[in-house]
Image (cartoon, rainbow, N blue to C red):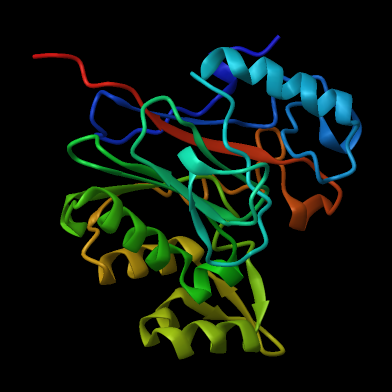
Amino acid sequence: MIKKSDFIIPDWPAPTNVHSLQTTRNGGVSVGPYASLNLGNHVQDDPLHVAHNRQLLSQFVPSEPVWLNQVHGVDVIDAANADCVPNADASYTTRHNTVCVTMTADCLPILLCDTAGTVVASIHAGWRSLCDGVIEATVAKLLTASNVKAEHLMAWLGPAIGPSAFEVGGEVRAQFIAKDTQAESAFKPQDNDKWLGNIYNIATQRLNNLSVNQIYGGQQEQFCTVTDSARFFSFRRDNVTGRMATMIWLTAPKPI
C-alpha cells in the first residue's frame, strides 16, 4: 500500500552512508482523523492500525525505529542503548542500522549528521523543547559521542507549523527572548498581544550559535503542516490527528 512517493526524502548533501526519511500522512490504513499513515500510538487511534502502519514502514528501514515517548523536554538518548520507549525528545547514534526517529504534527523535526558519516540524530523541537535547549543538548551529545567538531555537522529542518500559522501569546515570545535576544526577530506582532512566530528561524539561530551553519530543508510555507492538509497531520488545525515520523540512520561506509 505504501510507496516511496508517499515520503519526503530530505534534500541535503549528507554522506552516502547517511539515510533519512520523512513520512507524510499518506500510505497507511488508519481512518477518520488519523487517515492514513498515522505512526503515533498515543493519539487514540486503533492500535492495530498503528501496528499495521509501522509494519508497512519496516520495508524502508533497516530495523525497528527507536520510538520515543516525547515529553517536550530536552533529554537526549543514545538510540543504540535505549530500553523500551524512553522519555526523551531526541536521539542519536553512531551504530550502523540503528534508526533514530521523532514524531510530529506541527512541531519541528530536525535531523543532524556529520560530514564524515559517523553520527546522526533526530530531534523533536516543539516550542517548549526548542526554547529550553533541545538542539543544544543534542549537539553536545554528538560532539561527545563522536569527537566531531560542530562546524562539521549539518542539519535538515522538516515539515512544521509555518510562520504564517504559528500564533502565540506574548508570554511565549518573552520566554524565547529571555533565552536568546536574537529570537525577537523571529516574531511579528498581531493584535491583542499575539505574535506570529517562526520556529524555523529560531532553530537556525540556535544552530548557528553552536557553529552549525550547514542548514537545509526548512521550506517554511511549502512544508507548513497547518496549511497542507493533504500531506501533513496538524494538531493545531485538527486537534485530533495522527503523527508523522522523521527518521535517520547510518549504514557502513562503502570501501573505497
Residue furthest to the top in view is 1
Residue at image location 59% in from the left, 56% down from the top:
88
Q: Provide residue 125's location: percent of width, then percent of height.
A: 53, 59
* Quarter the C terminus occupies: top left
Question: Which quadrant of the figure has residue 113?
Answer: top left
Residue at image location 75% in from the left, 58% down from the top:
236
The answer to whether residue 237 is above or below residue 128 is above
Question: Which quadrant of the figure has residue 5?
Answer: top right
Residue at image location 81% in from the left, 19% down from the top:
29
Residue at image location 41% in from the left, 65% down from the top:
137
Q: Provide residue 114's location: percent of width, then percent of height.
A: 24, 43
Whether residue 201 can be seen here:
no
The answer to whether residue 202 is above or below residue 114 is below
Whether residue 34 can be seen here:
yes
Q: Provide residue 225's location: percent of width, then percent of height.
A: 63, 47
* 235 and 85: which is toward the camera: 85
